[in-house]
Amino acid sequence: MHDLTNVGPRIILGFGDGSVFVTESVLFGIMVATVIAVVLVWLGKGLTKSPSKKQVMAELIVEFVYNTTQKTMGPQNLRFAPFIGTIFLFVMLGSALGLFGFRPITADINTAFALSTITFMVINVSSIRALGLKGKLQHMCDPYPFMFPIKFIEMFSLPVSLGFRLFGNIFGGAVVMTLMFTGLASACYAIAKSIPIFGTIPFLKAGIPLPAMMFFDIFHPIVQAYIFTMLTMVFLSIEIMKHGDDH
């Protein structure tokens, strides 16, 4: 069950006068990153020419990430595959924490905007490295110089739109699940008052929420992680494209 008693994440640790603190989003984010690192290191250890089941799984994951990156960004941009795979796994697992009764870290606007800011920095730094500063400015003035202010605003609106899209979808799903569990608990209480034989056992929670949990805690995080990474790849491809390559 999702805990959304407060709109913001709970403070887990506070230091000094309380102005420096660690929220549950930070704590769970570190845990998710650690799990991803440990599992991937374990999958990558002991590789042989005669692959084991573990190695086959690792090769399938790597092949999927690289094939997806190649199809979306082209074979010349495969160097971005590790970044794309990491972002996908982190967003997916961080958004699926509700399955274990925790608040999804991407339901925290700070986490969503941290991820979109990282994407924004990777896109623009890679663009300047690929085109040069002059080429980047030319790209922003294409096809006419008066387009520069519009593309400048568009450039900085990217992390805002990515962050709000991810936060809004995951937070909305968490709110729906919270309302559902609260409503079912209230219904159980009302039934118990009318028909004492049922007692106060929350029997309505036994199976009714399962379809919603399957959607909001499993399918929905996968979809949102896919959308986030696909948008990242699309915008990254556009920004590192050499001036005039699309003509």
Image (spheres, rainbow, N blue to C red):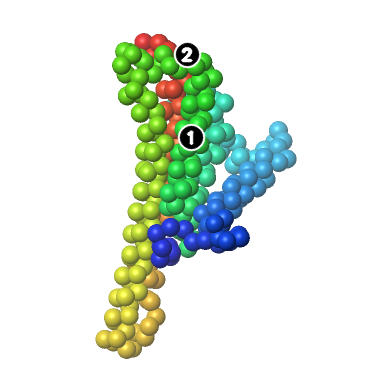
Q: Earlier in the sequence, mark 2 or mark 1?
A: 1
Neighbourhood count class around disc 1 (C-alpha, 10 Å): few under 14, some 14–19, many 20 upward: many
In the rendered image, the vertical position of residue 222 relative to residue 207, given as above or below: above
Q: Which of label 2 and label 1 is nearer to you? A: 2
- Residue 236 can be seen, yes or no: yes
Residue 92 coordinates in the image, percent (x, y): 48, 47
Q: Closest to the observer: 197 or 157? A: 157
In this view, the residue farthest toward the bottom is 196
Secondary structure beneath disc 2?
helix
Image disc number at residue 134: 2
Neighbourhood count class around disc 2 (C-alpha, 10 Å): few under 14, some 14–19, many 20 upward: few
Residue 27 is left or right of residue 213, and the answer is right
Query: Residue sitting at 46 percent across and 48 percent down?
Result: 110
Q: Closest to the observer: 13 or 245? A: 13
| Quarter of the image that includes the N terminus | bottom left
Query: Residue sitting at 72 percent across and 36 percent down?
Result: 48
In the rendered image, the vertical position of residue 71 relative to residue 212, given as above or below: above
Q: Closest to the observer: 112 or 137? A: 137
| Quarter of the image that includes the C terminus | top left
Image disc number at residue 119: 1
Q: How much space separates mark 2 and mark 1, taking CA atoms?
A: 22 Å
In the rendered image, the vertical position of residue 130 relative to residue 184, given as above or below: above
